[in-house]
Image: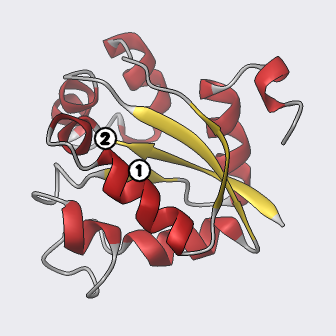
Amino acid sequence: MSNTLAIIKPDAVQSGKAGKILSHLEASGFTVKALQMTRISAVQAGAFYAVHRERPFFDSLVSFMTSGVVIPMVLEAEDAVAKLRGVIGATDPAEADQGTVRQLFAESKERNAIHASDSDDNAAAEIAFFFSEHQRLGL
């Protein structure tokens, strides 16, 4: 079993879809190991998405991610990173497979309901970004 990070984004929280997304993830075989509701600052969002700093969408991404409450969570499953990437679908919901989180719940390519780690190394770093060492002890 391995862990990965998912974040239910502000669009999904604000539109009341967080519970449906969480239920979808659990029905897809994930166990929620840690979860919190929080609001992140522009500095935190900039640091979290630093890999995208040079991309044209960086500023709008930071603005979007700081626009409301987010729900970061640690999910456990066999090959969790790859499994979650498949369950959430393509970044653009118009291109996402039927039944994926983004196809079901996303509004657009930018307001796409959920973030998921893209590698085991990034999952570990992203989990540490949101969850303290004490919170990670049970993982």
* Relative vertical location of residue 29 with respect to residue 47 in this rendering, above or below: below
Query: Mark 1 falls on what kind of element?
Result: strand
Q: Depth check: 80 or 49 in front?
A: 80
Circle 1 Cα neighbour tier, 10 Å, few/some/many (<14 / 14–19 / ≥20)? some
Residue 9 badge: 2
**In this rendering, position of residue 39 left or right of residue 108:** right
Percent x, y of residue 110:
17, 50
Residue depicted at x 19% and y 22%: 67
Residue depicted at x 24% and y 50%: 17
Q: What amino acid type is highlighted by mark number 2?
A: Lys
Q: Quadrant of the C terminus?
A: top right
Percent x, y of residue 11:
18, 41
Q: Depth check: 56 or 82 in front?
A: 82
Residue depicted at x 40% and y 69%: 88
**In this rendering, position of residue 93 left or right of residue 35:** left
Q: Quadrant of the N terminus?
A: bottom right
Please tell me which of labels 2 and 1 falls first in the chain.
2
**Residue farthest to the right, as pictured:** 137
Q: Are marks 2 and 1 in contact (CB under 8 Å)?
A: yes
Q: Is residue 26 visible?
A: yes
Query: Mark 2 falls on what kind of element?
Result: loop
Q: Distance between the Cα atoms at labels 2 and 1?
A: 7 Å
Circle 2 Cα neighbour tier, 10 Å, few/some/many (<14 / 14–19 / ≥20)? many
Choose top left, top right, bottom left or bottom right for residue 132.
top right
**In this rendering, position of residue 20 left or right of residue 84:** left
Percent x, y of residue 13:
26, 38
Residue 123 badge: none
Choose top left, top right, bottom left or bottom right for residue 131.
top right
Q: Which residue is label 1 attached to?
A: 115
Q: What amino acid type is highlighted by mark number 1?
A: His
**Residue farthest to the bottom, as pictured:** 98
Residue depicted at x 30% and y 82%: 99
